[in-house]
Amino acid sequence: MELRAYLHILWSKWWIVLLTLLITYTATLIFTYQQVPIYQSNATFVVKLSPSFSSDKDLAAAVDILSRRTEIGTTFTQVADSRLIKRLAATELGLSGAQRNDVSITSELLPGTNVLKIAIQSTDPVLARNMANAVGANTIAYVQDLYETYKLEPLDQASLPDEPISPNKPLNLALGGVMGLVLGAGFALLAAYLQAPATQPAGLNILDHETEVYTRRYLDLRLRQEISRARRINAQFSLALLNVDRQRMLAGAPPQIQREALRRAALLIVTDLRDEDVIARFDDTTFAVLLLDTAPEAAAETIRQLQTKLTTTPLDLSQRDLTLNLQVIVGYADYQPGSMEAEELVASASSALKAAETDASGMVYPALFKQSPYQLSMAKAADHE
C-alpha cells in the first residue's frame, strides 16, 4: 500500500487517532501523578594507599596491585551493599521498620577509577541523604581492618536531593503522547483492514468491494496497456460509460440498497460481456466497459443492447422487498489509431455521457469525432426514440 493510501486512511479515521491519543495521554497523566516520588542521594569514596609501608618495594607493589586489579574495590562495594552495614546504619539513625523497608542501597566502583559510589533511594529525601552518609561511615569503619595497605576515605558527602528521580514527568508525558499517536494510527489501520472485504486481494486493491467489479485505478492501467497493444497490432476497441441512475433514484436510498442495486446492475452487464472484456466502476453510479478487439459497429450494437437490458430489467431486491427500474444513459468512444492517449479516450467518452445527460431523448451517445456512418445512424436513431 502506498504512503498516500496510509495517510488517506489516517485522515479518514482521524477520530480514532484523536480518541486513542486522549485516552492514552490521560491514562499516562493519571499514572504519573499517582506514583510516589523516589529520591536518590549519592555519597562517593576513594580507595587510597595506606601511608605506612615498611619499604619502597612494598609501596611499589601496592601501587601496582591497585592500578591493575579491582578485587579490593569490589570487596568494598560488597561490604557497602551488605545487610550488616544497612542494619548498623539504620540502628545508628534510629529508623523504624517501615523506614528500613523504604530504603534501598546500591554501590558501584566507577569504571576506570578507584572511586566508590554509594546510592540510597527512598521516598523521603532527608532519609536518603542521612542513610547514604551513615552507610558510608559504617563501611569505612568495617573495611579499615580488612587491608593494611589500602583504606577507604570520604570524597563527597551525600546532599539533600532537590528533585525525585522517579517518576520523570516530562519523559512520561512525552512517551504517553507518542504511544497514543502510534496506537491511534494502528487502530485506524486495523479498522480500515477489518472493513475491507475478505475477497479483496491483499495489496492489489483492483476490485471495488461494493460492486465486485474492477476499480477505476485498474481501468486506467488496462486502458494504457490496451492502447499500447492496439498500436502494435492495429487492434480495435471501444470504451463505454454507463450511468445506471440518470434520475438519481439511488442518491437518496439507504447505503445497503445502493450497494445491492449497483451489484445487481453490474451482474446484468457482466452476463452480456465476453471473458476478454473489462468492466470497472467509473464513479458512484457509472460503470466503464472496455469492449476489446471489437469493431466500432459491433461495439455500438453491444452498447445499445446493454442499455436496453438495464433499462427494461427491473431490479428485484428481494431481501429489501423492493423493485427498482433503472434509467440508464450511455456515452462511448472508439479508440482512434495514432497518437490518442488513455486520458483523451476517457475524456471523449465522458463528453459523450454528458451529452446524453443533457439530451432528454438520447440514451446512447457516441463521441463526436471520426464517427462511422453506422455510429451516426445509431446516434440519430437514439434522438428519435
Image (cartoon, rainbow, N blue to C red):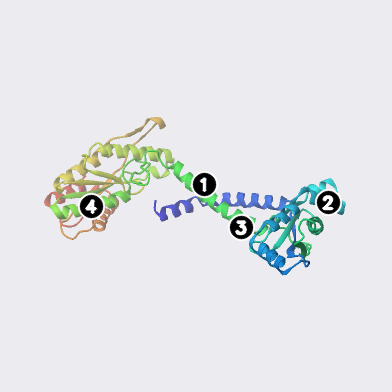
The image position of residue 384, as x and y in percent, is 20, 47
Marks 2 and 1, how far apart at CA: 55 Å
Label 1 and label 4: CA atoms lie apart by 38 Å
Secondary structure of residue under mark 1: helix
Q: Which mark is residue 88?
A: 2
Q: Residues within 10 Å of mark 4 (few under 14, many from 20)?
A: few
Query: The residue under label 4 is which amino acid type?
Result: Gln
Q: Is residue 56 above or below residue 222?
A: below
Mark nearest the camera among 2 and 3 is: 2
- Looking at the rendered structure, the secondary structure element under dot 4 is helix
Q: Foreground residue, 312 or 244?
A: 244
Contact between marks 1 and 4 (CB within 8 A): the answer is: no
Q: Nearer the viewer, mark 2 or mark 1?
A: 2
Image quarter of the C terminus = top left
Per the model, the C-alpha gap separating discs 3 and 4 is 51 Å
Amino acid on which disc 1 is placed = Phe
Q: Which mark is residue 174?
A: 3
Which residue type carries mark 3?
Ala
Q: Secondary structure at mark 3?
A: helix
Sequence-first disc among 1 and 4: 1
**At label 2, which amino acid type do we have?**
Leu
**Marked residue nearer the N-terminal end (2 or 3):** 2
Q: Residue 61 sits in which quadrant?
A: bottom right
Specify whether 320 is left or right of 287.
Answer: right
- In the picture of the structure, the residue carrying the numbered disc 1 is 187
Residue at the spot 20% in from the left edge and 49% down from the top edge: 238
Compare marks 2 and 1 and give the one earlier in the sequence.
Answer: 2
Sequence-wise first label, 2 or 4? 2
Instruction: Give the Cα separation between the discs numbered 2 and 3.
Output: 42 Å
Residue indicated by mark 4: 225
Nearer the N terminus, badge 3 or badge 4?
Answer: 3
Which class describes the residues within 10 Å of circle 1: few (<14), some (14-19), or many (20+)?
some
